Image (spheres, rainbow, N blue to C red):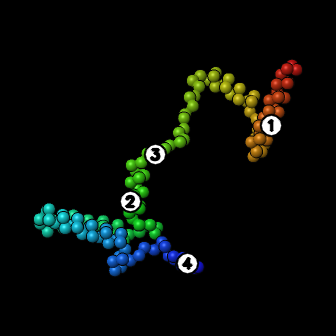
Amino acid sequence: MRFQVPQFIEVEDKIFGPLTLKQFIYLAGGGGLAFLVYILINNLIISIIPILLILAAVSALAFFKINNRPLILIVESAFKYYLGGKLFIWKKEDKPKPQTTEAAVKEAKNYASVMVPKISDSKLKDLSWSLDIKESIYSDKKQR
């Protein structure tokens, strides 16, 4: 038994002439909202600006696409981003600097005796090298 596999499943069906169902709902809702504004204000000259703004927004929602994504998805993503919580994982903490020069000199001497040159890109080899160096320094100090 053979079944027909649907093709072009990403393309929406045109139900109302050249309009899809979503486009028709946006335009019908915008037209109704514009009519409601006209009825509430009861003056065509004053209500023309809000009506034009409503019609522009509704036609953008119905027809405008950014990167082949409908504008309503972009607006939804923007609202989720701005209203949602944000997680910051890394925050730099400043280390306090030593106040006296004597403390800085002592700290530099401590680091100079433990400094190990980096000889490879492998952390395991570096660790092995640093352990060998520390072991030889420790054994030299014992012999003296």
Three-letter amino acid code at disc 3?
Lys
Three-letter amino acid code at disc 1?
Trp
126, 98: nearer the viewer: 126
Q: Residue at x 34, y 80 (%)?
A: 17
Find numbered disc 1 in the image and state the secondary structure of the residue it sits on. helix
Q: CA distance from mark 4 to mark 1?
A: 67 Å
* Front label number (2 vs 4): 4
Q: Residue at x 30, y 65 (%)?
A: 57
Residue at the disc numbered 4: 3
Mark 1 burial class by Cα count in 10 Å: few <14, some 14-19, many 20+: some
Residue 59 shows in the view: no
Quick one: label 2 or label 3, which is nearer the N terminus? 2
Number of marks drawn: 4
Placement of 114 over or under 74, stated as above or below: above
Q: CA distance from mark 2 to mark 3?
A: 18 Å
**Percent position (x, y) of residue 85?**
43, 45
Mark 4 burial class by Cα count in 10 Å: few <14, some 14-19, many 20+: few
Q: Which mark is residue 75?
A: 2
Residue at the disc numbered 3: 86
* Front label number (4 vs 1): 4
Quick one: label 1 or label 2, which is nearer the N terminus? 2
Q: CA distance from mark 3 to mark 4?
A: 48 Å
Quarter holding the N terminus? bottom right
For residue 28, which quarter of the picture? bottom left
Q: Residue at x 29, y 70 (%)?
A: 27
Find numbered disc 4 in the image and state the secondary structure of the residue it sits on. loop
Q: Which mark is residue 5?
A: none
- Pick out the residue farthest to the front: 1
114, 64: nearer the viewer: 64
